[in-house]
Image: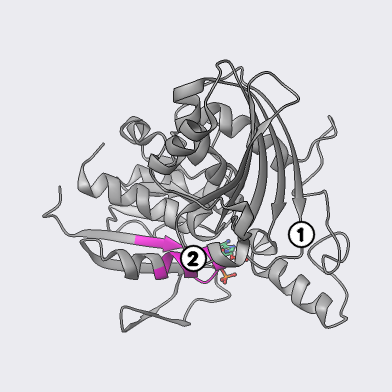
């Protein structure tokens, strides 16, 4: 497939994820000959500079995919995806969808290329990109599950405001300048809000439920015991997560650390004596998942704690989507 020149449409090109996808596409230099940048009527007509050339942003419409695209990346929210992804797929385009609209659909693969690339070939036109906090979690969980069999997971997240889009970043910046919050229900500056996405009847938030359900789907362990608390923190970019894991089998800590070091997409930063552990500002702008503070959990028989940090807009969204397309183009799945 590599000699073919492809056509790609980026939907939500003016948003935070869209703009980062543009950067990632510039870096990757995939054999894509034609690009189209789409958004709402609000930004139609504005210009996007891509690889030194100006492109006019077009309004997303029902006939936008008539000209025949090979790939579309959707980052324009769930409602836009629900309406337009099936239209794009029906015209022969492979959609990589960043929203939560199709993630739990049985007919839609939910893919992290380092974890379950084999799922890509089961697509029927739409491939879902998992939630940002799930993506960075499953990258280290997969090699550990393969080796020691995961029995239970406790997630506690510390999520950056960029995960809520431009308006999330604006809320933090405005808060620093003494202006009131608009996006979040409380000021995010100087606060940690245990509230990401809407609350459900069972007391969890949708974000927490996404982490639980998506992890089960990606690891192909529908009954895995998982609980989660997702917290928004006053950090501009890159999510941090505490992941407590209980295994079926015993492990040697050094061997476990080596397993993570040798796994794809991971950089281990774990040298406590020298204050080396993953931090958000070091993860910004990179596609790796950084893992540190790796230590035994002595409260259970076979448990470990990890501190996991990644750029939520890159690996958690834009880069993961582009990596899926790269895999398809390279025909490695
Ligand atoms: P626009 O800039 O025209 O509003 P973010 O998550 O950073 O807020 O970005 C959301 C992205 O989704 C933007 O590019 C936005 O375009 C786009 N978008 C929102 N609603 C629609 C829609 N109905 N059709 C197409 N694009 C949309």
Of 43 and 280, which appears nearest the observer? 280
Picture coordinates of residue 238, whole percent (x, y): 61, 60
Q: Is mark 2 within 8 Å of ligand 1?
A: yes
Left or right of 316 on screen, residue 30: left
- First of labels 2, 1 by sequence position: 2
Q: Residue at x 50, y 39 (%)?
A: 140
Residue 251, placed above or below residue 196 = above
Picture coordinates of residue 226, whole percent (x, y): 68, 27
Q: Residue at x 42, y 41 (%)?
A: 127
Asked whether 56 falls inside the magenta stretch, the response is no
Residue 200: numbered disc: none
Residue 233: numbered disc: 1
Q: Give the quarter the ligand 1 occupies.
A: bottom right
Q: Residue at x 62, y 62 (%)?
A: 280
Is residue 171 among the parts visible in the rendering? yes
Disc 2 element: helix
Q: Which residues are magenta?
A: 9-23
Is residue 113 among the parts visible in the rendering? no
Residue pointed to by mark 2: 18
Residue 129, placed above or below residue 224 = below
Left or right of 89 on screen, residue 307: right
Picture coordinates of residue 179, whole percent (x, y): 86, 80
């Amino acid at each position: 497939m590599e000699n073919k020149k492809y056509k790609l449409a980026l939907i939500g090109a003016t948003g935070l994820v869209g703009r980062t996808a543009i950067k990632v596409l510039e870096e990757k230099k995939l054999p894509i000959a034609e690009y189209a940048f789409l958004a709402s009527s609000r930004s139609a007509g504005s210009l996007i500079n891509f690889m030194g050339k100006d492109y006019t942003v077009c309004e997303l419409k029902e006939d936008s995919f008539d000209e025949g695209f090979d790939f579309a990346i959707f980052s324009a929210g769930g409602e836009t995806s629900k309406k337009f992804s099936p239209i794009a797929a029906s015209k022969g385009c492979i959609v990589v969808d960043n929203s939560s609209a199709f993630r739990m659909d049985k007919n839609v693969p939910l893919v992290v290329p380092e974890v379950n690339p084999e799922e890509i070939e089961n697509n029927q036109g739409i491939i879902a990109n998992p939630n940002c906090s799930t993506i960075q979690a499953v990258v280290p969980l997969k090699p550990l599950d393969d080796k020691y069999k995961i029995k239970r997971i406790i997630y506690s997240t510390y999520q950056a405001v960029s995960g809520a889009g431009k308006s999330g970043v604006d809320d933090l910046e405005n808060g620093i300048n003494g202006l009131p919050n608009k996006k979040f229900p409380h000021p995010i500056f100087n606060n940690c809000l245990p509230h990401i996405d809407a609350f459900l009847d069972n007391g969890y938030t949708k974000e927490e439920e996404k982490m639980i359900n998506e992890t089960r789907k990606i690891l192909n362990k529908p009954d895995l015991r998982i609980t989660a608390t997702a917290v928004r923190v006053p950090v501009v970019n890159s999510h941090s997560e505490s992941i407590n894991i209980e295994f079926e089998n015993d492990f040697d800590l050094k061997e476990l650390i080596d397993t993570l070091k040798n796994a794809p997409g991971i950089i281990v930063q774990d040298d406590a004596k020298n204050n080396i552990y993953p931090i958000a500002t070091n993860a910004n702008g990179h596609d790796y998942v950084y893992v540190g503070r790796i230590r035994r959990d002595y409260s259970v028989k076979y448990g470990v704690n990890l501190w996991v940090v990644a750029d939520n807009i890159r690996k958690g969204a834009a880069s993961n989507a582009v990596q899926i397309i790269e895999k398809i183009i390279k025909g490695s799945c």
